Image: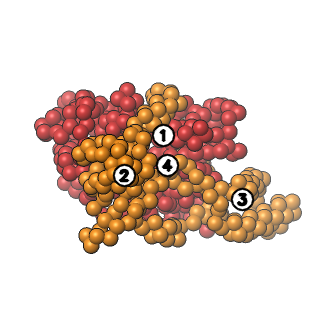
Chain colours: A orange, B red
């Protein structure tokens, strides 16, 4: 069961799908979407509340409510990136030596390859300098945040070392949508008004 | 893509923030950028080839990815052409709306395709909303792995990312006039995604694992053909309204089977919408709301009319104001995601 607990006294709590009541109060909101509940609470100016998960055995746990928004966090594996850069420098050095030495071995090397490698290196260096990654802006109501974090270990690393792409199959179409900027402003104002 | 073309089209704004909407679909990858008026699309398919099968010199006009050990992957729409030549099925990085567990090279190839699709982001502070399906109600696969793989890909590009429900993106793109209240349905290749939104807030979202691929698979099975061929005939000839003008008997049989399966898909989805709405939406929506239909599977002529005929046979748990098609069913999700990104980024800067 999911319970909404409003602590402030004397506030009228009006959540669609539940009865209007005055706080302090605890309301069963199991059948109502939590996003909706928080939206209506914000609309009514109620900030002092908790959303509590109650198990069949009566164990109560306050659910964390994350506010939406892009956040930045430091990267976890700087060392790996640096090692990656070092190995790329070594490969690049080899390519340049081959190129200048008139292809001493039989491997075809051209300036385009070297440019590609330099671009990759530049990108990696920028990544280290920027020192930023982002977490999602999802509003999560999870009882098991630790499990979510553990999952990350099983997500494969992206390693494009040695992979190259030639050509492109991209098609472009003119956008029929109205001005995205204006629509975004309207969305912000409505969600803010509603929530 | 020609590099010179890209440079010309890009708006040389001095503002360093760049917002992106990235629709990651089973059949198409679609990208909308805040600095461009056009939307970029590529097919989300590839064809792995042995280097014995073909020489690189034979691929002069073809887009391909070359692996470190000489592996070759023909990508995009060219993969379909070569699949027919080599008598192979194309590989799909995604299956039923999610990252495919079958394709070992899928993530690397997909990463390169996405990098190409997104285009130049150098020296920009980039924010991107990418689409994810809602949890399917008729299949057990979790969305979490899929969501995190794309998060990692975008992170590897140095992009700030967030995931947004695909059907909600349709609401952002198509329902501004209703103040973002409505029901968005995306009939893609792998999944049908549904979201009920009230004033921009998601009240219900779910997906089903039946969509375009299901139609092709079931049709292929009933006619005794390979799904690739059915997909190709569907895209070439399929019309869901009016007379079928094709004279070839076999093609007519395929089109008749396709019609039947389109109708079955719509019936299935509408029944699920009614059930989920009745069970999970416990609010009074005091105004009539529209249904906006989008996605590649909704593109054949007559789809929206068929959808209307089917849904009006049901007793709906909400007042319906209108059933309409997205302005461009292929780009609606990417545009909606772009709108959401811009809205989020402006909110952060206030």
Badge 4: chain ID: A
Looking at the image, residue B301 lies above or below residue A106: above
Relative to the observer, which residue lies in front, B287 or B247? Answer: B287
Residue B23 seen in render: yes
Mark 2, chain letter? A
Residue pointed to by mark 4: A68
Q: Residue at x 65, y 56 (%)?
A: A132
* Labels 1, 2: front one: 2
Is residue A25 shown left or right of residue A8? left
**Mark 3 and mark 4: Cα distance apart in space:** 26 Å
> For the image shown, how many numbered marks are present on the structure?
4
Residue B248 x, y percent position in the rendering: 22, 39
The answer to whether marks 1 and 2 mark residues whose Cβ atoms lie closer than 8 Å is no
Numbered mark located on residue B340 in the image: 1
Q: Which residue is mark 2?
A: A6
Q: Look at mark 3 in the image and give the residue it sits on.
A: A128
Residues at marks 2 and 3 on the same chain? yes
Helix, strand or loop for disc 3: helix
């Amino acid at each position: 069961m999911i319970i909404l607990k409003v602590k402030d006294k004397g506030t009228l709590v009006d959540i669609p799908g539940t009865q209007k009541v005055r706080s302090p109060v605890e309301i069963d909101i199991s059948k109502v979407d939590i996003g909706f509940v928080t939206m209506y609470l914000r609309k009514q100016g109620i900030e002092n509340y908790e959303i509590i998960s109650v198990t069949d055995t009566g164990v109560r746990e306050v659910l964390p409510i994350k506010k939406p928004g892009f956040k930045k966090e430091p990267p976890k594996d700087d060392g790996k990136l640096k090692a990656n850069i070092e190995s790329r420098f070594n490969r690049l050095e080899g390519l340049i030596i081959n190129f200048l030495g008139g292809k001493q071995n039989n491997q075809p090397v051209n300036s385009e390859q070297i440019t590609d490698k330099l671009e990759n290196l530049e990108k990696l260096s920028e990544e280290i300098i920027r020192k930023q990654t982002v977490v999602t802006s999802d509003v999560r109501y999870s009882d098991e945040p630790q499990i979510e974090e553990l999952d990350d270990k099983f997500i494969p690393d992206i390693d494009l070392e040695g992979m190259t792409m030639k050509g492109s199959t991209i098609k472009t179409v003119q956008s029929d949508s109205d001005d995205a900027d204006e629509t975004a402003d309207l969305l912000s104002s409505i969600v803010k008004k509603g929530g | 893509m020609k590099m010179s073309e890209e440079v010309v089209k890009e708006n040389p704004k001095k503002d360093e923030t760049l917002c992106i909407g990235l629709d990651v679909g089973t059949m198409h990858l679609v990208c909308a950028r805040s600095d461009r008026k056009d939307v970029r699309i590529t097919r989300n398919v590839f064809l792995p080839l042995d280097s014995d099968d073909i020489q690189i010199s034979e691929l002069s006009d073809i887009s391909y990815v070359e692996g470190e050990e000489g592996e070759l992957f023909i990508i995009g729409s060219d993969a379909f052409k070569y699949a027919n030549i080599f008598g192979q099925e194309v590989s799909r990085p995604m299956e039923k709306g999610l990252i495919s567990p079958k394709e070992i090279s899928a993530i690397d190839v997909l990463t390169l395709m996405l990098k190409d699709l997104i285009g130049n982001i150098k020296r920009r502070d980039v924010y991107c909303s990418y689409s994810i399906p809602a949890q399917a109600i008729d299949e057990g696969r979790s969305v979490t792995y899929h969501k995190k793989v794309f998060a990692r890909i975008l992170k590897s590009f140095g992009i700030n990312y967030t995931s947004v429900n695909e059907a909600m993106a349709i609401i952002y793109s198509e329902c501004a006039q209703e103040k973002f209240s409505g029901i968005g349905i995306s009939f893609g290749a792998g999944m049908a995604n549904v979201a009920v939104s009230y004033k921009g807030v998601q009240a219900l979202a779910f997906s089903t694992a039946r969509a375009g691929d299901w139609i092709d698979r079931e049709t292929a099975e009933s006619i005794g053909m390979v799904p690739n061929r059915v997909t190709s005939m569907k895209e070439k000839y399929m019309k869901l309204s009016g007379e079928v003008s094709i004279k070839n008997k076999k093609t007519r049989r395929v089109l008749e089977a396709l019609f039947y399966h389109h109708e079955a898909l719509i019936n299935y989805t509408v029944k699920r919408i009614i059930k989920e709405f009745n069970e999970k939406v416990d609010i009074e929506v005091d105004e009539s709301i529209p249904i906006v239909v989008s996605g590649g599977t909704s593109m054949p002529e007559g789809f929206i009319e068929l959808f209307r005929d089917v849904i009006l046979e049901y007793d709906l748990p909400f007042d319906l104001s209108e059933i309409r098609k997205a302005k461009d069913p292929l780009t609606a999700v990417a545009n909606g995601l772009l709108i959401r990104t811009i809205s989020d980024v402006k909110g952060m800067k206030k």
